Structures are given as structure tokens and as C-alpha cells.
Image (cartoon, rainbow, N blue to C red):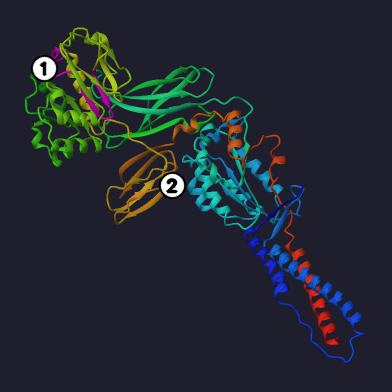
Amino acid sequence: MFNLSFLNSVLLFGLLAGIIPILIHLFVKYRPKIVYFSSLRFLKQIQKNRARVIKLREILLLLTRILIILFLIFALSRPVMKTILKKSSPTHAPTVAVIIIDNSFSMNYLDNDETLLRKAKIIAFDILEMLNSKDKIMLQTMNSTYNSRNSYFARPFAIKQQIEKIAITDNSQSLSSVLSDIEKKLTQEDVINKEIYFLTDRQKHNWKDVEKFKNKIQTDLFIIPILTKNKKSNLSVISANFVPKILTEKGRSEIRTNVKNFSDKKVKTAIISLSINNITQAEKAISLRPFQTKQVVFEFQNQNTKFLFGNINVKDDILPDDNNFYFNFSQMELPKIVIISEKNPSFQFSTALDLITENSWQKISSQEISDEIIEKNNLFIFLELNEFSEKLKYFSEKILKSEKSIFLIPNEKMAENNFLKLWLNENGIKFLDLSTQNSKINFINKLHPISAIFNKEMFEKTRIRNFWNISADDFTLLFSNNFDAPIFLIKDRFLVSTIGFDENWSNLMFQTTFPVLLYNIGNYLGCKKAKLNNFSTGIPFEIPNFGKFECRLPDGQTIPILVQNEQNKFTQTDQQGHCFLIKNEELQKVYSFNSPRDESDLTTISEEKTKELMTEIPKIHFVSSADWKEKILTSRYGYEFWKIILWIVLGLAVFEMVLAYSGKSGKSDE
């Protein structure tokens, strides 16, 4: 069954012009010249015969003129017909194709001494062999920088070198954004044969947002899988945190990292190492159950250097791209703490703050808060506030927005302070009622840096006399009592206590754990640099000053930078690792980048999901590694035959002129 399509289908409306000759025929009649004879008896029969000839000629002229108009419009609309052709046959209209090679880091997976990316390149070469010199092709990847530089169509033979140059990217685009850009390019190509080929490992996360694009996919998209012979396995370092310590020997801190096994196989021995300033600090061996995430804790000696940068490494040769997690951090600094209150803190509280800050903390009233106070401090302790003015609300919101910290300590009249109560409600906190039941610490969150070092034995002698029952669903619980009521809870950098810090509330202030607890709170919330710093690849960073700089990229390449105005953003951040900002041969700053860990999960899209997508989006075709050559290029159409139609128009025009001339000759004979 032939399938007819038109490249300029809008011109088909011109077929309505075929009615013009009919209108002319109906309203423009030829009136014969009247000649008077003495006798008409011998001419009547001749006139009747002549009328039949004229009528036949007029009908033929009418049909010929209608056909000329119809065939001319038909030719201008450029009809093409789908035909059964060999894939490599030269007897087809040109094909415009786009090959998308998935070069996200999961394609660096090593399968029998060959990466999946290499296998994808071999398939791309096979596709080029199926095309010919009349076809055009564009090569795209999952990297926006590469795509912007290669967003043009070329002949197949010119693409081969481009395929070989494709490398794994640390900064992948989403599939929907790649397809969106490609569709825009394809709409500019005035051909009927268009197809897209996506060479991929069919990783599940690639398809998480493609449904948003389903109404815009206008071109046949063939997903060609790159398969492995065995089940995939992968280890990945997914995060790391910096934890200052008080209970270890002086000058030592911790870095805690999470390592995940992304497979259904048990890993008996995985070697995890910590490096700081390119020096290995420690190594540990761990075992991981299928799909298990395990925390590994490294202690390290603080170093007297201006910049500290490092990485956590897990040894996994099958997929090396997520083996490292890069970070940087500054030397430990003293917590910068200010108490906002109308009353003085207890002796135990103020003494602990003296030890933590080396007597550098300060106390102000709620009316004394200012932009300068906020700029100089990192932790703001709201101690038993009696008033909460509009001014304090404004600065409280500013504190949280600037990623500084608030520690709220209540008083007995907390629920009666309506303005404070309203602001807390806006932040998800409700003080319900004050309980006078005696209780003790019954739960300790071992996963949070503030509470991780404690255990129940440390609070064995601690008694809580009064506490507030509160509701705060979005907060993380740090400590709770034996009534399951929260004692300390936190959200981001907002810490809330349900007890006051004097003897009317608890004997906690008289316990040896109290200064340790306050130390952890101060260092976690009061130190601006008490965390590891890193960015996701692709995020630009700001250069802090004007002048000439150099940026040394993770691959060793050095890029000169001149900052003269406010355009001080550096955007070439596609690589994992450390970027070093240098001025006059002196290191100014270190920026650390990691790829998003979505690629670490090698789970492929399910058969059920592929069927669902093909049903919802008819232009998507999931093909197999065995039959993709038979499936692609099925939308190819035969040559346009408008030239043949134009020859028909020319023949009809000659025929029309002959008929018209013979009609004039007949009239002149009369």
C-alpha cells in the first residue's frame, strides 16, 4: 500500500483554483456571428454537425485547463510516496538523521575489556554505512557544550572523525532537553525523511522527564540499546560530611562518607581511602550487602595550610567515574556566636560559651540587632525571648536566608508570645503545652553531627523537669525523652530546644556532657566553614576579585581569565575534580566539582515502561540489539515525482494550445 505525503502540503489549498476554468466556461459564452442568407434550408444540417464538434472541443478545453491547474498545484506541493526500498539504495529521497550517542559516565562501564561508549561508536559507524552521500546527518551527545559546537548537518563521510572524538562527559543534559534542541533543528530541514537514533545503555533515570516532552516529539526516535553480557555492578561514593570533634585528640577532626553498592551482589572487600592535599591520610576495607549504603568514618590531623582539598576514593575498576567524591574546606575557625535576650544566661551556659569561643561571644538585646551584627556572626541564640518585634522578625528571616543559624531556647510563656508564635508557625513549629512530667533522654540520633558522638549512658544522670510539647513535622529529631517528646530538633540551620538552659528546666547544665553538646552545636552552626564545600558539575562559580587570573582545570589545562567588571562568572565547569584559581602564581581559591550521582544507579528501564512509552508516544521505538538494522529507516520515502508531473503539465499545455488554435481556425472558416 503506497503512502503519499507532501513536503509543501499547504499549497494543496491551491487545488481550489481548479474551479476557475469552470466559472469562465459558465459565465463567458461565445456568441456566433449572425450572417443573413437568402435561404437557410441547406445550412441547418451543417450548423447542427458543427455545434457537436464545438461542444466537444469546449469540454476537452475545460478538462485540460482544470487538469493543468490541478497538476501544477500538485507538483508545487512536492508529493513523495513511501516505497519498498533497500536500506542502502540510492533510489530514495535524501534522509536527514540525528545520531545521539549517550556519553554520560555510565557509558564508561567496562564490559569484557570494552566500554559501552566504544560499543556505541561501532553501532554509529554501522548506521553511517546504511546511508549514502545524498543523506545528511548530525551528531549529538548528552553534553550541551559538545552539542552547541556540532549542531549542524553534514554528509555521512564527514561525521566519522567526530564519532571518534566523543568522550565521556561529567556534566550530562537530560534527554528531554537534548530532544527539544534536535527537534528545532529538524524543523528547519525541508525534507520528508527524518529520523533520530539514540545509542544508549537504556539507563532508567534518562527517562524520568521525557514524558514532559511527549507532545513535542515529531520525529521517529529509535532507541538502540548497548547491552552488556553480564549483570552490572557498581560502587559509588555518594556524599561526604565534615565533623569537628571534641572527644578525639587535639587537632583531629572527622570526615564521614557514604558508599553505596548499586547491585544485587555482595561486595566482600571494598577499599575506601581519604586523600587531603594529594596525600593519602587513611584507608579502610568494608563489606557491602546488595544495595546497601554504609557510612565510613575517617579521622585526620588538621594541617597548617591555607587551603585544604581532598577526595574520598573507592576502588572499583568497572566504572571509575563515580569512584571519587571531591571537596575542599578551610581551617577550623572559632564559632561566632551572639545571644539575643533580655536576661543573662546561666553561669554554666556562659562558661561553656567562653570555652568554645575563647571569650569572643557577645550578648545583645532584641533591639540591638543590626546588619553589622548579622554580618559578623554565624549562630544567633534566641534565649527565652519575652518580646519578638517586627524588627527581630525581619532580621530572623534574613539570618536564615543568608544560610546562618538560629538556636531557639524557650521560656515558660512561649505559647503566650503571639508574634513569636505566629512566626514559628510560619516556619512549621507549634508550641502546644508545657509538661511538668519528669523524664530523661531516651533517644539519640546517631546520624546527625551534633548528636552522633553521644550515647544513652552519657545522659544517664540527666533529668528533665519541664519540657514543651511541640509539633514540627519537617524537623529532624536529635534527642527525645521517654515520653517520645522531642528535646532538640533541627531543620537545615534552625535548631529548636524544648527546654530552657537553667536548673528550673533540667540538670543538663550540670552534666559533663553539656559543654560537649554546646561545643558540637557551636561548631556545627557557628562555624561558617564547618562543612565540606563542593558543587555539581556545570555550576558556574564567581571569581571574588578583579584582575588577571588563571584557572587550572582537573585535566591539567590552564585557562587565562580577565575580570574587569561584574561579569565574573567562570562557566567551564564540566569536569569532576578540583579547579584551582591562581593569581600571580599564588593560589587564591579551590573549587571542587562532582557529577550528580544519578548515573551511579545502572538500573535499566523496564519492559513494561518501554511498552507504556511507545503506547503514549507513537514516535518512540524501542528496538533490540538484534534487529535494529531492520527497524530503522522504515520511514524512508521514494523520490519526489514532481518533475514527472511538470512534464504532464507541459503536455497538457501543448494539447490545450492545439485545441484552442483548432477552435480559432474553425471559427475563421465559418
Q: Would residue 277 be seen by someone viewing this image from the given angle?
A: no
Q: Residues within 10 Å of mark 2 (few under 14, many from 20)?
A: few
Q: What residue type is disc 1 on?
A: Asp
The numbered mark, 1 or 2, whose residue comes first in the sequence reads 1
Vertical order, 8 against 544 (above or below) = below
For mark 2, give the secondary structure: loop
Residue 184 percent location from the top left of the image: 54, 52
Residue at x 77%, y 71% (from the top left corner) = 62
Q: Quadrant of residue 525?
A: top left
Distance from Cα at disc 1 to Cα at disc 2 = 59 Å
Question: For the C terminus, which image quadrant?
Answer: bottom right
Residue 322 percent location from the top left of the image: 47, 32
The residue at which mark 2 appears reads as 557
For mark 1, give the secondary structure: loop
The residue at which mark 1 appears reads as 502
Q: Which contiguous range is marked in magenta?
A: 487-510
- Left or right, 406 with respect to 228, comes to left
Comparing labels 1 and 2, the label whose residue is closer to the camera: 1
Residue at x 91%, y 80% (from the top left corner) = 45
- Left or right, 539 with respect to 395, comes to right
> Is 424 in front, or is 515?
424
Residue at x 39%, y 34% (from the top left corner) = 326
Q: Quadrant of residue 254?
A: top left
Residue found farthest to the left: 343
Residue 631 percent location from the top left of the image: 70, 40
Vertical order, 27 against 78 (above or below) = below
